[in-house]
Image (spheres, grey):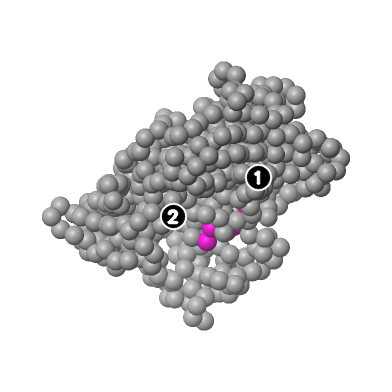
Amino acid sequence: MRKRWFGLSVLLGCVSLHAGAANFFENFDGAKLDARQWTGDFSITNAADEIKAKDRLLFENDTSFVKLSAALDTVNSLQLSPLKAAEASILSFRYRTEIDKRAQQSFTVSIDGVEKASYDGVGVGWRTGRIALDAGSHQVEFRASAKRAQVSGAYNAVYLDDIRLFPDKAVSLRIFPQGSLDTVAGAEGHLVFTADALREDGSVKPDAGPLSWTVSAGAGVAENAAAGSPNSVLFSAEKPGTYTVNVKMGGLSALTVNVTAHSADFLQKPYTYPGTGKTYAGFVKAAKGSGPAPGTDNITLTAPAAADFEADAFFLLAGKISTKPAGKNYARMEITKEGSQPPLRTWRIIKGDFAERIWLPFGPGVYKAVIQPFDTVTLTTPPKGEGALRGGSFASTTLPVEFRITNTRDESKDIPDGDGRWIYPSFYIQADDFAITNLMHSLTGSLKTVREKVAAVHDYIVSTFVYDQQSFVNPGRSRKMDALSALKNKIAVCEGYTYLSAALLRSAGIPVRIVTSRGINHAWNNVYLDGKWLFYDATWDDPVPDRSPEIVGRTYFLLESLTGGDTRHGTAGKIMTGDAE
């Protein structure tokens, strides 16, 4: 599994106390290099020249960087000497390898004649290398070479940039999650906070010292229990209110603000959805002459409070399914907007004791809801965790539950395509769940542009997730792939990548569509940015098998296409109207 916190120092920012400037830094953008310090048979190039030479976009900016050839019988090196460290330090550098093991191409870094690291890979983007150095004067050599003929189509080169030396000291603290957070008061709700000590470049310094935590609400103190590791804490609030979590280490501190602990009945109350910034009332009132919430021998509803009612964008569905045999308490709920042609509908699966918001995605008007309990169900059997529902059957003698909802919310002037289908939460895309909104605030809260937010979500998922080969090869043993399950497991097939991307982006106020293709057995996203629907496929940007957390490709990121980003995706993808068709 990949390291959890890749990239968050760049994305989040933190309250920190910074040390002095780095001892050494070179980005190759300025004047000619000092020949007394830099030697070797390297060249300096830039993104524009490389793009022109390769006829392909490999680089994201127009700055200059070093190029080392890795062609047959060619050894290129960049030597830096002397490099003087006044104290224990970190040598950091950005690198991009376009070399192939089949040609026995290699990129190595040596310190004082001793090889300390080697790297390879093709088409994997810029990464960061870090090597610890003792105090003193050092000779550093970056070296690219090949023992066999180059592979056709490979780039046969290594690129270097941003070489720096800085003290191996913690200069700031980062707390995660952070920003505007939500939880539930009492035993049902908790948040796990993790704190990391960061070096000057944002990398984590292990064993930086003991951490101390304070959790406060005015003059009171909330429950504060260890969560199993010295740099994390399990926070829970006994009573509703607003709390502040602080962490300290030596002279460094970090905090997260606006932790709101909600009362247990929060689902019954109006809700301010981050995705639109609007407050929705939910259940408004029963229609004139309406009876109570319907029910059958198998389904008991405690909400909604009427069989025919008005709602503002969503309503609370709560109750219990009781079928035989025990453990098979599943039902299918279908919601159709009346009078729509072709029919606009969505559906979801409910189970056992349930309480959840049901969003009405197709704008104002009358909706019909039908809940049909399953007579039999078939579940997947993954090695760990609850299986996904693969199928089920309905008994002809089992009566469904039906009711009608009049949605009074009109979003036609504010949302692309005039309704909530691309921005509201749904069955697989739980964009209103606290776990999703808390992560979204942590990833995007400090960012200003929509493109930055989309990139932060994309890179988090690609760097954190592992592709679920088992579920792909054997669907009968598949894990659940909705957004919340994917977030919990950190392993998924394309559905999990797609639904979690949509949940995080929708909760950040960015419209997202789901696209599927039976032809290639795949799912991906459209993201609405700058007035256009753009192609986004986090699954195919994640290398398989899983590799370094810093290997984040953007080959399929925000391309100007709707249902196909290249010839493999094609143009036959189907845009899902209700997210779960």
Label 1 belongs to which residue? 113
Of 1 and 311, the residue lying toward us: 1
Q: Position of residue 135 (x, y in %)?
A: 47, 44
Whether residue 76 appears in this view of the structure is yes
Q: Position of residue 445 (x, y in %)?
A: 38, 40
Residue 246 drawn above or below residue 39: below
Name the residue type under label 1. Answer: Gly
Label 2 belongs to which residue? 206
Name the residue type under label 2. Answer: Pro
Q: Residues within 10 Å of mark 1 (few under 14, many from 20)?
A: few
Helix, strand or loop at disc 2? loop
Helix, strand or loop at disc 1? loop
Marks 2/1: CA–CA distance:
27 Å
Q: Quadrant of the N terminus?
A: bottom right
Residue ID at (50%, 70%): 330
Look at the image and give the residue range highlighted in magenta: 489-494
Residue 550 drawn above or below residue 216: above
Residue ID at (47%, 50%): 5
